[in-house]
Amino acid sequence: MVHFVGAGPGAVDLITVRGQDLLREADRVIYAGSLVNPAFLELCKDGCICLNSATMTLEEVLDAIINAEREGLTTVRLHTGDTGLYSTIREQMDRLDALRIPYDVTPGVSSFSASAAAVHAEFTLPGVSQTLIITRMPGRTPVPDTEDMAALAKHRASMAVFLSASLLDRLTAKLLEGGLQADTPAAIVYKASWPDEKVIMCTVGTLEKAAREAGVSTTAMILIGAFLNGAGERSRLYDPSFTHMFREGTVAD
Ligand code: SAH
């Protein structure tokens, strides 16, 4: 059996309880060593073999899984953050489907959530934005034309931009092209939840300069939007006049 597990953003206590249990029971762990905290490997039982996929091809990862299956062993494939975002699990699951190897998926805390927590922000504020756009700049992996950053910026929604810390000049140009003002709030969160986490508050216009001055060019989340300024209107959920399923307010809605 193969378990795909989201390790969370970095801190060892931000993996789920289920993910931690699976890690403790695994015979083989294949971890994304470029971003997964090596401290997770200390949870593994004696005799567990841990392989760093940063130095492996997809074929080598699959060979390791297939060999473990032949021996009736349990493999944990440990990915950073959540398994559902930029994690490459789909291509692995497709191969396992073809080989009829069973697997399940345990989600994790994504770095976009950990980054919002690091800056004490909420993406969805009444009167500011009720939408979060999760995206990236095109790098070696292309982004479909319909998801061009300038087109996404036109929505004025809250944004969490992955995999783009080394492309900040281009990101700024695209956001301005999409009509955002240069003074729109932005945050660069480097290694959210790790001991060396850094939070840099800046604006759309100063992203590249702010990252350069802080020495950040990898493993960072870029947050963009007016939500970083703080509350807009108060939420209706906790408004004394608002009636809902669990509370009788002074005004029915
Ligand atoms: N599946 C992961 C994303 C992997 S892609 C998740 O859900 O978080 C790798 C990118 O994620 C990095 O380039 C960076 O943009 C972001 N990232 C991963 N861990 C991070 C962290 N601890 N702090 C900030 N950004 C992080």
Image (spheres, helix red, strand yellow):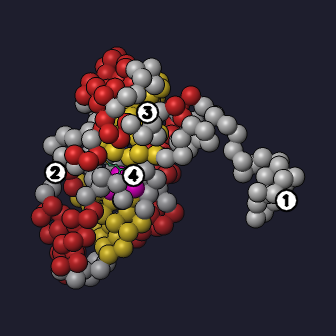
Residue 207: say if magenta. no
- The residue identified by callout 3 is 224
Q: Which of 148 and 68 is in front in this view?
A: 148
Disc number lying in front (1 or 4): 1
Determine the secondary structure under disc 2.
helix
Instruction: Find the distance from the CA under tag 1 to the CA under tag 4.
Output: 39 Å
192 left or right, relative to 2 = right
Give whichever of discs 1 and 2 has the lower sequence position.
Answer: 2
Instruction: Find the distance from the CA under tag 3 to the CA under tag 4.
Output: 20 Å
The amino acid at mark 4 is Gly
Residue 81: say if magenta. yes
Residue 21: which numbered mark, if any?
A: none
Disc number lying in front (1 or 2): 1
Above or below: residue 133 compared with residue 74: above
Q: Split into 4 quadrants, where in the image is the C terminus?
A: bottom right
**Disc 4 beta carbon < 8 A from ligand 1?**
yes
Q: What stretch is highlighted in magenta?
A: 79-83
The amino acid at mark 3 is Ile
Q: Are marks 4 and 2 in contact (CB under 8 Å)?
A: no
Q: Are marks 3 and 4 in contact (CB under 8 Å)?
A: no
Query: Which residue is rendered at x = 87% and y = 52% of the image?
Result: 250
Disc number lying in front (1 or 3): 1
Residue 81: which numbered mark, if any?
A: 4
Give whichever of discs 1 and 4 has the lower sequence position.
Answer: 4
Residue 166 location (% of width, % of height): 25, 30
Q: In which quarter of the image is residue 5?
A: bottom left
Q: Is the magenta stretch mostly helix, strand or loop?
A: loop
Q: Do the residues labelled 1 and 2 touch (CB within 8 Å)?
A: no
Residue 122 location (% of width, % of height): 56, 41
Residue 248: which numbered mark, if any?
A: 1
Disc number lying in front (3 or 2): 3
Give whichever of discs 4 and 2 has the lower sequence position.
Answer: 2
